[in-house]
Image (tube, rainbow, N blue to C red):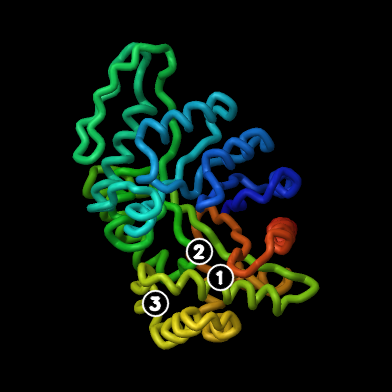
Amino acid sequence: MQWGLPWPGPQVAELAEQAGATAFCAGEFADTNSYLTTGEMVAATRRALVGPGIAYAFARSPFVHASALRHLSARAPGRLFLGLGSGTYRMNTDWFASAASEPVRRMEDLVGAIRAYLTAENGRPVVHEGEFYPIHADIRAPVFGRLDVPILLGSFNRRMVTAAGRTADGILGHGVFTDRWWTETIRPNLHDGATAAGRDPQSLRRWGWLITAVDEQDPERGRRDARLQIAFYLTVKTYDTLVELHGWGDEVAAIRTAFRSGDIAGMAAAVSDEMLDAIALCGDLQEAGQRLAARKALPDLAFLSSPAFMVSDRRRARYAESAVRLMSAVVAA
């Protein structure tokens, strides 16, 4: 398994690259722009792949996605990737004022439109006959030339995973993915999408986030923070298919009841040991290493993600440093 980190800042990133990290990714929210963070990563890294992981897909036009990638690629040639996520319907309509109907078809069309810009040759029109993103851009400027940037989709359920297999270069899996979810949902649907489109399933990237909370001084705090992050994610009904697969309905009902009442301790307590074992790396270094060894279907490239829910920036930074120490110990062993 290759590994990387959500962007931890330049100091930790330097240590991570020395320890073997092969990629860094940039998340996005109301106060964080994934392309701006990717610019920081480009400036502060030397060898690692860098890119949005994820950028909100429908909040920007294909032109804006592609121009940002071309700008960044000039400073980090061959090191960029693009992870796209659809976001929820409410986020698109209420936050972004963007259209969000038919998100799977819209995402496939967006990938094609971005690629039309990324593969455009100098002096040639950019054309994409899309359902949602028709492009006929006659841009007469020497700014193009084919650019190879892998596009991965933040995919969870069957339809988006299949769409990634049909149109994208792979997927960026969610932090709550378990071995069973990788094996029983991701692998077959990615395969079906690729083969239906006449593509080689083995050529697709299987990347994903992995909740990681290693605390040598207070292992129980690491476990609690991992439980809280799992609980926070599972307040969202989008992930109910994973919950149903594992038979975690009672636990998730308790999580959501605690969340609605503001009972943070209750949210953590509702995450069972079985759920923690299936999802997170946590505890001290030895325990986290054992948890890592027990996983049998990890992504090909795992971004070791520090918990963020109810966790300070300072503690998140310590978790990132501990993740580097964990992978250094794994390699040394």
| Badge 2 amino acid | Gly
Looking at the image, which is closer to me, 217 or 55?
55
Label 3: state its secondary structure: helix
Which residue is at a point 29% across and 54% down the rendered structure image?
A: 162
The residue that label 3 is drawn on is 243
Image coordinates for residue 94, horizontal then vertical, percent: 36, 55
Question: Gap between marks 3 and 1, in whole Å?
Answer: 15 Å
Image coordinates for residue 313, horizontal then vertical, percent: 69, 59
Q: Residues within 10 Å of mark 1 (few under 14, many from 20)?
A: many
Which residue is at a point 35% across and 22% down the rendered structure image?
A: 120
Q: Residues within 10 Å of mark 3 (few under 14, many from 20)?
A: some
Image coordinates for residue 91, horizontal then vertical, percent: 38, 56
Callouts 2 and 1 close, C-beta under 8 Å: yes
Q: Is residue 257 visible?
A: yes
Q: Which of labels 3 and 1 is toward the front?
A: 1
- Disc number placed over residue 229 in the picture, else none: 1
| Badge 3 amino acid | Val
Looking at the image, which is closer to me, 302 or 332?
302
Quadrant into which the N terminus falls: bottom right
Callouts 3 and 2 close, C-beta under 8 Å: no
- Disc number placed over residue 175 in the picture, else none: 2
Q: Is residue 199 above or below residue 311?
A: above
Looking at the image, which is closer to me, 97 or 168?
97
Question: Gap between marks 2 and 1, in whole Å?
Answer: 9 Å
Label 1: state its secondary structure: helix
Of mark 2 and mark 1, the one earlier in the sequence is 2
Q: Is residue 215 above or below residue 220?
A: above
Relative to 76, 129 lies left or right = left
